Every structure is written in C-alpha cells, then in structure tokens.
Image: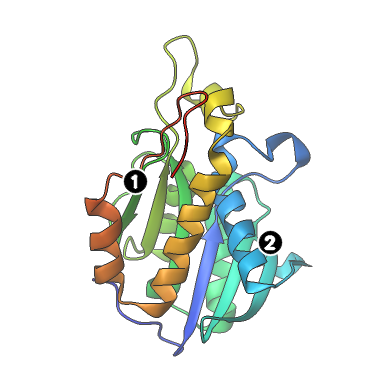
Amino acid sequence: MVEESSLEGHYVLVGLGNPGHRYERTRHNIGFLVANAVAQRAEVTYKEEKRFHALVAKGRFEGKTLHILLPQTYMNESGRSVGAYLSFYRLKPKDLIVISDDVELPFGELRLRAKGGSGGHNGLKSIEAHLGSQEYLRLKMGVGKALAAATLAEYVLDLFKPEEAAVLDEFIGRAAEVVKSLLCESSAVVMNRVNVKNMSPNIRLGAKHE
C-alpha cells in the first residue's frame, strides 16, 4: 500500500505523453488527456515551467493540494521532468499518481498499481531511473495490443480506431474519477474497487453506453 503524501495533503498527478499537436489524441498521449480532464474538474490552468521541462497546474481539489504535471521532454525522458519537480518541492515517489497507456490491457480497461516494474513502458522506465524507486501509484489505461502489421511504436503513436474514439471521452472520464477518489480515500480501497471491476466500455459501433 502506498503511504500518504510526505508533504501532508499534497499529490502530484503526472500525465505521460508527447508534446505537440500531432500527438494530441494518440494512444501514447492518453495520460495527457486524463490529466487535462482532472485539470478541468479542478478548475486549474497550466503554466509553462521551463525549470521542470513541463506544463504545470496547481490548486486545491477535494480538499487537497493537487499538482498536475505534463512533462514536455517527450516520453522517453519523462523522469527528468518528474525528478526535478519532486526534488524542488521535496516530495517523494509515494506522492505521485502517474497515468500511462498500457498495450497489455484491452482498450477501456483500467488497472491501478501501487508499485511494480515499467512493463516495458519507456515513460515509466525513465521515471523509475530518475527516482530510483518503483513505489508510486500508477493508473494504467488499456489501449489494446498492436495489430500484427504495426510495430509497437507505430501503434502507440497512432490515433484510436473510430469505434474507440467514439467512447474515448467516457474512458478518460472514468479515469479522472479514479484520480478524484485517490484524493478522498485510501489507495487500497480505490485499488480494490478499480481492479475487481470489469470497467471496459462497450465499444461496438452504435451500442448504448451506460
């Protein structure tokens, strides 16, 4: 179980992705999309913070101080941004909530973990390398496996399929609600609720979504 924040009531939400318009709605940028959804709910706006190589938004949300960080280093160097931010504010890995895409999970499935390896995800690898720790919360967003004809890089840097794009905002919204819950409840309670449910949306074209 991840402990409470070392600076009481402070949490750092990191959305992983790549900067630039061309990557905005790609699979690899779903972390950015979720962070943006949380920023909207918290009614905070981003400022460019060059010393952290990031866009940063900060404010009160659900009675806590929430820092939202979008590294602008490109995915493979995300840890440089996260490490600089935590060091400046004297925060610890246990204060993090990191949002990333996961090709091993079906599209629409959420998985919350308190610690563990990177699973081959370069953004998580970079964070672990810079922090020297794997003990931080990560919310994994299922984007499905690559098609046989595509390399992994091509797949994650591509847009979602039309039937996925149709329910993407709903998926992002569910993830944003998980982040909100993590500010109000223990991580163990939220983890159990997220991981035991089949939270995959029905992505059939024309299907109704509850």
- Crowd band around label 1 with a 10 angstrom C-alpha radius: few (<14), some (14–19), many (20+): some
Name the residue that disc number 1 marks: 199
**Closer to the camera, 166 or 36?**
166
Kindly identify the amino acid type of the residue bearing the numbered disc 2.
Ala
- Residue 143 place in picture, x, y as percent: 45, 34
**Closer to the camera, 18 or 207?**
207
Kindly identify the amino acid type of the residue bearing the numbered disc 1.
Met
- Crowd band around label 2 with a 10 angstrom C-alpha radius: few (<14), some (14–19), many (20+): many
Residue 178 image label: none
- Residue 33 place in picture, x, y as percent: 61, 50
Q: Nearer the viewer, mark 2 or mark 1?
A: 1
- Residue 207 place in picture, x, y as percent: 47, 29
Q: CA distance from mark 2 to mark 1?
A: 31 Å
* Residue drawn at 74 percent across, 67 percent down: 46
**Closer to the camera, 146 or 131?**
146
Residue 54 image label: 2
- Give the number of callouts: 2
* Secondary structure of the residue carrying numbered label 2: strand
Q: Is residue 161 visible?
A: no
* Secondary structure of the residue carrying numbered label 1: loop
